Amino acid sequence: MSKTANTEAATPSRLGTWINHHLHSVVFSLGRALRKPWATVLTVAVMALALALPLGLSIALDNLKHFAGSVQQSRDINLFLKPELDAAAAQDIATTLRARADIAEVVLRTPEEGLAELRQSAGLGEAIDALGDNPLPTLLIVTPADGDDAALAASLEALPQTDLVQHDALWRKRLDGWLAFGARLVQVLSVLLGLGAALVVGNTVRLDIQARREEIGVLQLLGASDGFIRRPFIYLGAWYGLAAGALALGLIGICGFALRPPLATLSQSYGSPFVLHGLDLFHSSMVLVATTILGWLGAWLVTGHFLRQTRPTET
């Protein structure tokens, strides 16, 4: 009774054997990659370059969206009133516009205030003094509420007191179109270059399978399952993907570090607080997970194909 119990205790369970083989495959595949350093470095470098391009474009597009968002916050509509309107009439119009639901704010700028700002910002004091009379009209700076800015601009232009309406809506539509095109371009490049990275892993694993063809044949004759044979190669592909993702993040970080100082200088010259942003810890982790899965998938597909070819036929 006790001898049988000891035998059962000494025999590992099926789950324990499965876990032990997975752990062994993880360590064995890593050791096999480290035993071929140059081949491993070349494979990882090619994958990293293929992954860094769409990743860098995605980060650049995200920064551009942040910059465009800060620019698009300036949605003001300049409403120039007719010259014959006095200050009281302009104030009444501003009060009426502030009561509208589609308008968030209205700032009244008198001709005197506009002339003083022009004198201070443009440095044209002597030229302005030579003009004599103030040629500037009364200006209402209208900030739209959430809604259709173009419709608001059209309604303001229809007012009888309006002389001119300035509203740059076309460039914002074009910018949104370019951003949408950039997002789609990043998606297409991500798919194509991700497929290329998976093929690189698959080709490397294929060469490893070819080098171990006799060993695989012996395991198949002994009745080893495809999963048992496939695991070391799958984990090898996962290691390739993980290393390529880490190297791609490193390359992106180096490029960002090199570009940040000149971009900061350029932003300061325009008086903008824009700062180049990279990936945070969460998104960096997601990149590593995605590249690991990509390497695993490439190795799984190629290994399954070659195992079907090398499986001995029954006679």
Image (cartoon, grey):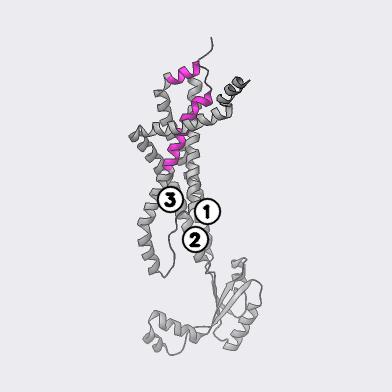
* Rendering coords of residue 260 (x, y %): 38, 59
* Magenta region includes residue 124: no
Q: Which mark is residue 180?
A: 1
* Rendering coords of residue 89 (x, y %): 61, 86
Task: Name the residue: 62% across, 73% down.
Answer: 103
Identity of the amino acid at label 2? His
Q: Which mark is residue 56?
A: 3
Mark 2 or 1, closer to the camera: 2
Using the image as rendered, state which of residue 31 and residue 179 is in the foreground: 31
Q: Residue furthest left?
A: 38
Identity of the amino acid at label 3? Gly
CA neighbours of label 3 inside 10 A, class few (<14), some (14 to 19), many (20+): many
* Rendering coords of residue 119 (x, y %): 41, 83
* Rendering coords of residue 309 (x, y %): 49, 20
Q: Which mark is residue 8?
A: none
- First in sequence: mark 3 vs mark 1: 3
Element type at mark 2: helix
Tell me how far mark 2 sits from mark 1, CA to CA.
14 Å
Q: Quadrant of the N terminus?
A: top right
Task: Name the residue: 36% across, 61% down.
Answer: 261
- Answer left or right for 36 relative to 153: left
Q: Eyeballing the image, is 194 above or below 159?
A: above
Task: Name the residue: 53% across, 22% down.
Answer: 225
Question: Which residue is under mark 2?
Answer: 66
Q: Quadrant of residue 264?
A: bottom left
What are the residue bounds of the magenta stretch? 215-244
Q: Is residue 196 visible?
A: no
- Answer left or right for 144 relative to 117: right
- Answer left or right for 271 relative to 225: left
Dominant SS in magenta: helix
* Magenta region includes residue 223: yes
